[in-house]
Image: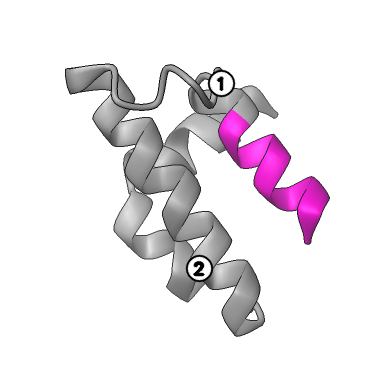
Amino acid sequence: MQDLFNTILDQSYCVLEIIPLSIASQIWIFFCIFYTQNYKEKKVANWINFDKNRSLVLTLEIL
């Protein structure tokens, strides 16, 4: 299951097309992906305190 999350996040720009979502959910997924990608490079998302796998899990739970 975590491999699936990694695959989806690695192809982050496909996520909104793969999963049919409401506008609010799409914005939340973009938010998670944006900060997850920046976290890897700039540590911008330190305050969010999640990793690649948990970010998508959090997204799916909030839907």
33 w.r.t. 54: above or below = below
8 w.r.t. 29: above or below = above
* Residue topped by disc 1: 50
Q: Residue 25: say if magenta.
A: no
Is there a contact, CB below 8 Å, between mark 1 and mark 2? Answer: no
Q: Residue 62: say if magenta.
A: yes
Q: Amino acid at mark 1?
A: Phe
Q: Taking the image as drawn, is residue 3 in sight?
A: yes
Ranked by sequence position, the earlier of labels 1 and 2 is: 2
Question: CA separation, marks 1 and 2?
Answer: 18 Å
Q: Quadrant of residue 53?
A: top right
Tell whether 6 sits left or right of 61. left
Residue sitting at 43 percent across and 58 percent down?
30
Residue 35, given in percent of the width and then of the height, sits at 37, 38
- Which residue is at the front of the view, 30 or 43? 43
Secondary structure at badge 2 equals helix
* Residue topped by disc 2: 27
Kindly give the residue lying farthest to the front in the view shown. 47
Q: Quadrant of the N terminus?
A: top right
Residue sitting at 42 percent across and 41 percent down?
9
Tell whether 27 sits left or right of 19. left
Magenta stretch, overall SS: helix
Residue sitting at 73 percent across and 50 percent down?
60
Residue 59, given in percent of the width and then of the height, sits at 66, 48
Secondary structure at badge 1 equals loop
Residue sitting at 62 percent across and 75 percent down?
24
Q: Amino acid at mark 2?
A: Ile
Residue 5, given in percent of the width and then of the height, sits at 57, 35
**Mark 2 crowd level (few <14, some 14–19, many ≥20, 10 Å Cα):** few
**Mark 1 crowd level (few <14, some 14–19, many ≥20, 10 Å Cα):** some
State which region is magenta: 55-63
